[in-house]
Amino acid sequence: MKITIVGAGYVGLVSGSCFAEFGFEVTCVDKDTAKIDALNQGIIPIYEPGLDSLVSQGIKAKRLTFTTQLSDAVKASDVVMIAVGTPTRRGDGYADLTYVYKATEEIAEFINDYTVVVTKSTVPVGTSREIAEIIKKIRPELIEGVSFNVASNPEFLREGAAINDFMRPDRVVIGTNSTKASEVLQKLYRPLYLIETPIVSTTPETSELIKYAANAFLALKISFINQMADLCEKTGGDIQTLAKGIGLDKRIGGKFLHAGPGYGGSCFPKDTLALSQIAEQHGTKCSLIDEVIRYNDDRKLLMAHKIIDAIKTAGVNKKVAILGITFKPNTDDLREAPSLAIIPELLKNGMTLSVYDPLYYCGSERLGHAFNCERSLEQVRFAKSSYDAVADAGCVVILTEWNEFRALDMKKIRELMNTSAIPLFMDFRNIYQAKDMTEFKYHRIGQKA
């Protein structure tokens, strides 16, 4: 079976390389010539553990190719997957489908034999229906069910763990009204039958909603545990024990019950906003999700002022060392990261910032990406290591739980920090225990200081 994936971004690249690993012939198509040239040389434009070797294996086996030419790829394919971006539309928060519609128009031009057109992109309810109508408008001679079918097949990839999520998924969702299209996609995922992966077969509308509902529910869990952390800090409770106590209930589960500075990334902020808009357009309300969105935005600023207030109370100097700025470990993604709300607020309140992140270090080629993402980062000093960042600081803040922050030499950090007052150590990911931090004024999330 031959597959074309339109869009060689995060989802397209991971999906394409994994399908090639399964033994299928995969062509990834993208308009970005520089990106395609780099990929053909084995240079990966994103950071995802293990992806570079998987891409190299696919290229070497001649099962994975990259091109800017859509026509030949579509003509030769049984399945064409749309994996382009659906960013939040400015002004209303709705998913911007410009790239999806444009990709559909171009795909329609080159459909030859029976083809299943699949949406991998996260799209609102009804998009599969719209894609089918676009194809028929561009090519009136094509008959739905004979020449083509449209299906929804959402991805559930976590940044930093995407390859494992693809190879060992919790489930595969296939949304189509066509038995023929369903059989084609069932064949595509047959390699997963060996590990008894559940296949959820449903309508396109339900499939499109499943992706939004899943991300919104996880965002809700994060916000819930953060609110419980706020309550623990007021009452003397401990959020980690609380999370364990409720997470052992199988109806609740322990995943995504880790208190922190708020969620970020490319999915949760975008998809919660989009789900809220979808509900409003259909005359109903997702008031729980609306509150999650508001609370998460407020929480990021709350974390900044928690730092500011602690510095004032402790009487330490205003140099703050920030450890980690990506929204989560094992990714170079800064989109909607808590750091991008916290850092400007600290700067606005007169703080001097020194930042260290494993993927955004001094002299890194990735530094330019950081600046493009948030211009205010130009006002911070990027350090070469954790220990370089903390030199002469009055306060250390852990924002991202990178592995290399889990066993820091606290004696060395204490010696490097400003010693005019007992320094602050604000652990916003609860990596350490208070008993091990006696040389600092130690603050954790969800525990009374």
Image (cartoon, rainbow, N blue to C red):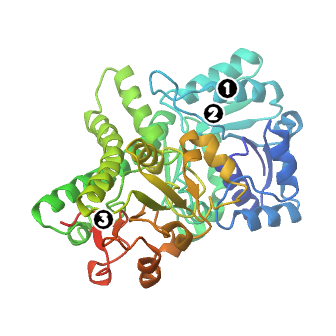
Which residue corresponds to the image point at 31% horizontal and 60% vertical from the top-left? 259
Q: Nearer the viewer, mark 2 or mark 3?
A: 3
**Residue type highlighted by circle 3:** Gly
How crowded pointer 2 is (Cα within 10 Å; few <14, some 14-19, many 20+) is rated as many
Q: Is residue 59 left or right of residue 17?
A: right
User: Looking at numbered disc 2 in the image, what kind of residue is underneath it?
Assistant: Val
* Farthest residue, direction left: 235
Q: Which residue is found at the position 54% from the left and 41% from the top?
A: 376
Asked whether disc 2 touches disc 1, contact meaning CB atoms under 8 Å apart, the reply is yes
Q: In whole angstroms, how far apart are the C-alphas of marks 2 and 3?
A: 35 Å
- The percent position of residue 133, horizontal first and vertical second, equals 63, 19
Q: Which mark is residue 150?
A: 2
Where does label 3 land, which residue? 253
Residue 365 x/y as whole percent: 73, 55
**Cα distance in 3D space between marks 1 and 3:** 43 Å
Residue type indicated by callout 1:
Glu
Q: Earlier in the sequence, mark 2 or mark 3?
A: 2
Report the residue marked by disc 1.
144
